[in-house]
Image: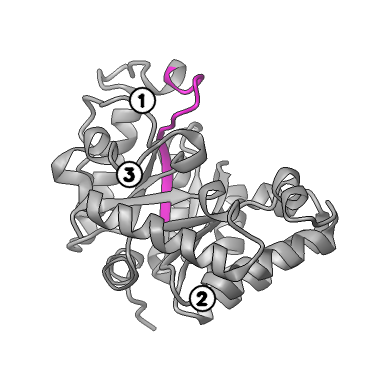
Amino acid sequence: MKHEPFGTRLRAVMEARGPLCVGIDPHQHLLDQWGLPDTAEGMASFTYTVVDALADRVGVFKPQSAFFERFGSAGVAVLEQATIRLREAGALVIIDAKRGDIGTTMAGYASAYLSEKGPLACDALTVSPYLGFGSLQPAIDEARTAGAGLFVLALTSNPEGPQFQSARTTDGPTVAGAVLDGLRALNDADGAEFGSFGAVVGATISRTDEDLDIRGPLLAPGLGAQGGTAEALRAVFGEAAARNVVPSSSREILGAGPAAAGLQEAADRANDAYRTALGY
């Protein structure tokens, strides 16, 4: 069965619902802020409140796997159910797990998250290329089969990132540049107008000399509480890549809960700002 590629579906949902990606991060600070216990039950209440309030009005969600995994099997079950419910409402789900390994181990991660029948089947997965871009091949193959996508760490905004990402490879480009080149080649090979293989590029990095036009999406975490602003997006990403940006915000939205109306107002306000900044 032929599946519509992730890039095509992502472009469509961003045009219809706006570019905003809401991070679902049930960490202890937010649970406390919402008056919920830091337990599996509190995490479930938090997560399903966000899903029920926003699933039909936001196009993209990014649950952070770590905040579910910390509750063991109960937390993973909530992640699984939330992903199902979001996708049933027409939203796309990027599970932020940053998986990266080699051979059959990477294939196992790909089967779990990207296979159509995988237990945590989502629309896209964040992955790490630091065992070599070629180590991602099992995930690339599974994503193409399932019509899913990948977001590969490229230019992250954490202070330690440049130590690796700005280092030069033996062939000359930076490590980040080599990752971007690899993604561009994948998207060019698929021949889609908007590819399914994207890069993670922090919204708070300074303007980069790297070529961000990878013919695919650019996931931009770090907006809102982490310091990134809608107005700065074009300065970071440039005019050519602006409409490929998927701006991701969590605390800016989640901090407006637990009332559904507060979450909806915060999401609508952020989405409007990103629409304007990115030229929608």
Find disc 1 in the rendering and name its residue.
175
- Going from N to C along the chain, the mark reached first, 2 or 3, is 2
- Going from N to C along the chain, the mark reached first, 1 or 3, is 1
- List x then y, in percent, for residue 41: 83, 64
Of residues 36 and 242, which is closer to you in this image? 36
Which residue sits at x=42%, y=53%?
150
Q: Amino acid at mark 1?
A: Val
Mark seen at residue 236: none
Q: Is residue 265 left or right of 34 when viewed as pictured?
A: left
Q: CA distance from mark 2 to mark 1?
A: 34 Å
Find disc 2 in the rendering and name its residue.
87
Disc 3 crowd, CA 10 A, few/some/many (<14, 14-19, 20+): many
Disc 2 crowd, CA 10 A, few/some/many (<14, 14-19, 20+): many
Mark seen at residue 230: 3
Disc 1 crowd, CA 10 A, few/some/many (<14, 14-19, 20+): many
Residue 83 visible within the image? no
Residue 106 visible within the image? yes
Residue 9 appears in which quarter of the rendering?
A: bottom left
Where are the magenta residues, as a range? 150-162
Kindly state the secondary structure of the residue where label 2 is placed.
helix
Tell which tag, 2 or 1, sits nearer the viewer: 2
Kindly state the secondary structure of the residue where label 3 is placed.
loop
Which residue sits at x=27%, y=66%?
11
- List x then y, in percent, for residue 226: 50, 35
